[in-house]
Image (cartoon, grey):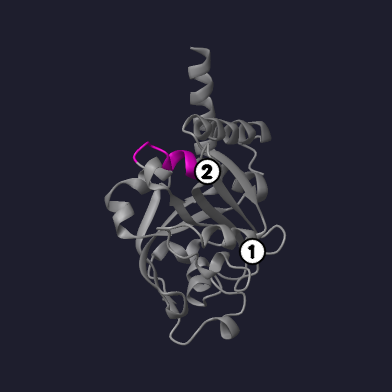
């Protein structure tokens, strides 16, 4: 773990965002059983289908390889979902990982349908390597939108990812409208590049041209420590 960030810092960071979510009427639960996650998400009206990165019949999502977060409202209904998975890219980089389709399938030759492809032109993707976490499938129910929750939802994901893997990078692939509306700024991702993934997965109805957004381990460490320090100052003032 990065020496600048302690276990106590991370614990406080996670607790901070969990408390914020509870005050907004959302209670989180997490799990690693992606069969259960697919069952949960396929019943959500208005959410895009979960892509193969988080489907156990497509990707390697065994113990320790990923987790999901589900937020439920006070009535117990699903109000939010998101998922994260880790890939160990010691011998390649994110651009190669995406373009090989291994970001989406454990065995692209067997699982990827005809016409499947991905092209990554984002320059920094060549330098994203080692322990890399993909953050995706994020959805929030309409009645909870417009309340400033993106930072809370991303914060709980960042904190849990740090505690579990201490990754070198966390990245996401997002459409242009999230950039234009400033929602990516609310998530807390400081870096972005266009043409991160021109992705075609016809068997899953996916035709995307997404931006690459990311943060480094150092940036996440600074985010955790800065957020905790600010919260402590407010508590003491």
Quick one: which residue is furthest to the left in this view? 180
Left or right: residue 173 versus residue 72 is left
Is residue 130 visible to the viewer in this orientation of the structure?
no
Q: Position of residue 230 (x, y in %)?
A: 48, 25
Vertical placement of 234 versus 135: above or below? Answer: above
Quick one: which residue is furthest to the bottom in this view? 114
Q: Point out the tag, 1 or 2, that comes first from the N-terminus.
A: 1
Q: Quadrant of residue 28?
A: top right
Residue 13, numbered label: none
At 36% across and 44% down in the image, what residue appears? 185
Q: Is residue 30 magenta?
A: no
Residue 35, numbered label: 1
Q: Please provide the residue range marked out in magenta.
A: 146-154
Q: Position of residue 119 (x, y in %)?
A: 41, 75
**Element class at badge 2:** helix
Q: Nearer the viewer, residue 71 or 68?
A: 71
Q: Quadrant of residue 1?
A: top right
At 37% across and 48% down in the image, what residue appears? 184
Q: Nearer the viewer, residue 114 or 38?
A: 38
Residue wearing tag 2: 220
Vertical placement of 50 versus 190: above or below? Answer: below
Separation of marks 1 and 2 at Cα, in angstroms:
30 Å
Q: Position of residue 193 (x, y in %)?
A: 36, 59
Q: Quadrant of residue 149?
A: top left
Q: Position of residue 32 (x, y in %)?
A: 67, 56
**Element class at badge 1:** helix
Q: Judge the density around disc 1: few (<14), some (14-19), many (≥20) Cα neighbours within 10 Å.
A: few
Is residue 171 visible to the viewer in this orientation of the structure?
yes
Tell me whether circle 1 and circle 2 mark residues in contact (CB < 8 Å).
no
At 62% across and 36% down in the image, what residue appears? 10
Vertical placement of 237 versus 188: above or below? Answer: above
């Amino acid at each position: 773990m990065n020496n600048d960030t302690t276990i106590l810092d991370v614990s406080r960071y996670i607790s901070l965002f969990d408390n914020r979510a509870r005050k907004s009427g959302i209670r989180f639960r997490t799990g690693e059983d992606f069969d259960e996650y697919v069952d949960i998400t396929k019943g959500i009206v208005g959410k895009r289908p979960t892509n193969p990165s988080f489907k156990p019949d497509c990707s390697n999502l065994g113990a320790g390889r990923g987790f999901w977060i589900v937020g439920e409202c006070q009535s117990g209904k699903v109000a939010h979902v998101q998922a994260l998975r880790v890939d160990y890219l010691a011998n390649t980089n994110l651009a190669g990982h995406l373009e090989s389709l291994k970001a989406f399938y454990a065995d692209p030759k067997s699982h990827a349908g005809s016409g499947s492809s991905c092209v990554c032109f984002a320059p920094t993707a060549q330098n994203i390597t080692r322990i890399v976490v993909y953050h995706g499938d994020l959805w929030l129910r309409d009645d909870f939108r417009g309340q400033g929750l993106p930072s809370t939802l991303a914060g709980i994901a960042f904190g849990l990812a740090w505690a579990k893997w201490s990754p070198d990078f966390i990245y996401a692939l997002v459409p242009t409208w999230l950039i234009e509306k400033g929602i990516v700024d609310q998530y807390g991702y400081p870096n972005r590049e266009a043409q991160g993934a021109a992705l075609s997965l016809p068997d899953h109805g996916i035709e995307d041209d997404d931006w690459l957004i990311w943060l480094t381990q150092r940036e996440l460490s600074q985010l955790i420590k800065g957020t905790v320090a600010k919260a402590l100052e407010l508590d003491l003032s």
